[in-house]
Image (spheres, grey):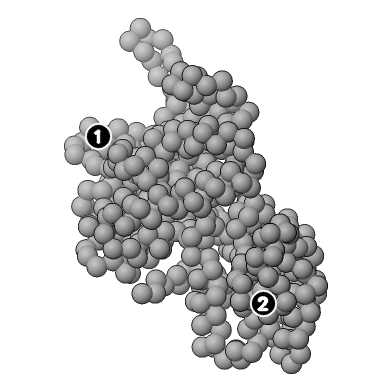
Amino acid sequence: MEIKRDYYLDKLIKRKNNGLIKVITGIRRCGKSYLLNTIFYNYLLENGVDKNHIIRFAFDSADDLYLIGESLIKIEKEKRGVDPEKFMTYIRTQTTGDGMYYLLLDEVQMLDCFESVLNGYLRKDNMDVYVTGSNAKFLSKDIVTEFAGRGDEIHMYPLSFSEFMSVYQGDKYEGLSEYMLYGGIPLVVLREGAGDKATALDTLFSEIYIRDIFKRNKVKNQGELEDLLNILSSSIGSLTNPEKLKNTFKNVKKSNITSRTIKKYLDYFEDSFLIESAQRYDIKGKAYIETPRKYYFSDLGLRNARISFRQFEQAHSMENLIYNELRIRGYSVDVGVVPIAEKNKDGNAIRKALEVDFVCNLGFTRYYIQSAYSIPDEDKRAQEIRPFRKIDDSFKKIVITKDIVPAHYDEHGILTVNIYDFLLNPASIKG
């Protein structure tokens, strides 16, 4: 069963022949290779590109390496990369005709001097280059610097809820429950049964993500790194910082880990795209607050597997889900802070900070969004919209709830929309 990834295919199509290296980044097993080597490849064929003008090469494939006189086993034993001269010689033999050639290169970090090789191909008018990779240089927010400003990044996430529903056999209510529990990693979504899905997620964590981070960054204490991941898994959407986490380690784990080491581990998690951090933004002061931050998992299934599916808080999971959907749609997302002054019972003025779950920006568009799992009464609604009432600009203010309610504006111009409409219809927050 094929899961369509039209959103990302469209991004590749729009960047076709733009003179830059198209670099597909994202957490491992989110579908990067399938997007490039199957979906985009078929698109090129269907749109008239000669099969002989599409060169697919996977640097972790024994068969592909055989074509250039390399051996995958020998490379592993000798702990070296693929010989760039052999690869370039092969490409020259495949690009002797007229017309544009499309290079679809997978796991390109296994090629020695890959930056120089790829930058060299950019100087050729008859080559359009697309790559994926899975090491630190590709699982990184600074990928474009690898190609001296000539890289064009397409960041890919696990399946959105809309993509998930395209293959889910059931209604959207059952679908959302399963999606929030097992996430959107394609190979997990296509597994049958809860047991198989849980096993697949556990395997991915232990054999792919943790091992990659541990090996790539030469971590000395894997236990501490995994403990930190467990703490983050248990507190998604909570404000924290390395110093606060250090105190948690000291009190709970009796560990003397330093805040500097914790900061380093957090960076490792972000560079592998396991988690993302949302910085606090003072809406009135129009300034960023460096610490503390909130951390969200790129896939809820991975987060839930990390804590053995024991701690499933709907409200926090929905907040994480909304964050991911906004990021998939291309918004930059911060946590809003609204400073206010109030009088206490003694009549003295005190300063407080109200929180807006998400401040979302895309170009000239800005939304303020609150995630409210349920709004059973007017008191709860007043609590949710209170920060909005303290913001004196005209940007749209939105409450997203799991309650089954039609989209509507209240007397303050605040839009309420249910989570299903938000996830399945991007226009639902634009009206």
Can residue 17 be spotted in the picture?
no
Q: Estimate the x, y position of residue 303 in percent, counting from the top left.
A: 40, 45
Density class for disc 1 (Cα within 10 Å; few <14, some 14-19, many ≥20) is: few
Q: Is residue 405 left or right of residue 104?
A: left
Nearer the N terminus, badge 2 or badge 1?
2
Residue 120 falls in image quadrant: bottom right
How much space separates mark 2 and mark 1, taking CA atoms? 64 Å
Can residue 93 be spotted in the picture?
yes
Residue 151 vs 381, above or below: the answer is below
Residue 37 vs 344, above or below: the answer is below
Amino acid tagged 2:
Tyr
Q: Secondary structure at mark 2?
A: helix
Most foreground residue, 328 or 248: 248
Q: Estimate the x, y position of residue 379 in percent, counting from the top left.
A: 22, 32
Most foreground residue, 408 or 74: 74
Residue 430 falls in image quadrant: bottom left
Farthest residue, direction top: 346
Residue with the mark numbered 1: 380
* Residue shown at 23% from the left, 40% from the top: 375
* Residue shown at 61% from the left, 67% from the top: 60
Q: Estimate the x, y position of residue 358 in percent, counting from the top left.
A: 44, 43
